[in-house]
Image (cartoon, grey):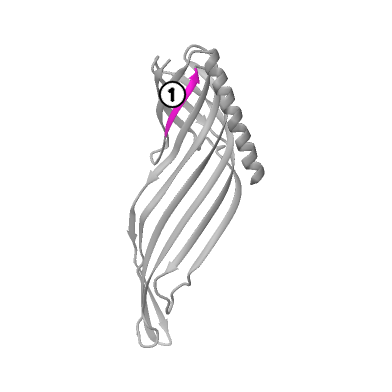
Amino acid sequence: MKQMKKIAITLMFVTIGIAAYSQDVAPRVNEFGVGFASTSSYSLRYEWGTDNMLFRITAVSLGASNINASQSEVITANNMGYSTTITYTPTVSTPVYLNGGLNLSLVHIKAVNDRFGFMFGFEIGANVSYSVVNTETNFIYYPAITTPNSNYSVQSITSSYEPFIGLVIGARYKISKAFSVFAEIAPNINYTYATVFNTVDAQGVNTPPNSSKTTNTFALSGFANSGAFITIMYRIKG
């Protein structure tokens, strides 16, 4: 983890140095745009530099939602000639779900012609998420004399932090002097630190215990075309 931080800091300073140099030797450009990876994942990007060397700041995977769902399941069992019916009715709500990320990248664009060019570079950044899920559960037993009914709710709070470092591979197509389209993938190596806290409002028959869990994982991601980002940029200056 410490080694990854050192590499990220070094690349950040190198990026800033290259970007500053490129702005001094060629006309500057400034662009702003919106990107999409799916209907539920989008990004906002600002980039500056030259036409073939761009320093970019991107807010990615922005999202927020509020979800409510419920379901019922009835199970009938015959025990020693007695019919026992168990009705399990969980109601799940997600009052808070937030996720987002921020990355810095430097890309070089090799022009093939006046409109089209291939793109290659690197990026560093981090993604974060936070959610609260409430589950209300009702167990109804018959007969209730031998096995008491149990109603309880569980609040599950999940959070994660994921720094990453990786490459940018893609292409740019200029629609006009003002608008261009970027298509890219960003294979990266990432570290995820995640925590889950489950709190039960009342301990009793058939209720789960309070619990907590922490995970630390390293992974490779972003290699599939399904994760490609399409970004439409508007040139403010240049």
- Residue 47 is a magenta residue: yes
Q: Horizontally, is 24 left or right of 156 in the view?
A: right
Q: Quadrant of the C terminus?
A: top left
Disc 1 on helix, strand or loop? strand
Residue at 42%, 79% in the rendered image: 204
The picture places residue 1, in percent across and down from the top left corner, at: 64, 46
For the record, the magenta segment spans: 44-50
The picture places residue 50, in percent across and down from the top left corner, at: 50, 17
Q: Horizontally, is 161 left or right of 135 in the view?
A: right
Residue at 43%, 74% in the rendered image: 207
The amino acid type of the residue labelled 1 equals Val
Q: Does residue 108 show up?
A: no
The picture places residue 223, in percent across and down from the top left corner, at: 57, 37
The picture places residue 178, in percent across and down from the top left corner, at: 38, 17
Q: Horizontally, is 218 left or right of 145 in the view?
A: right
Residue at 33%, 58% in the rendered image: 69
- Residue 113 is a magenta residue: no
Q: Does residue 193 show up?
A: yes
| Residue that numbered label 1 is attached to | 181
* Neighbour tally class for label 1: few under 14, some 14-19, many 20 plus, Cα within 10 Å: some
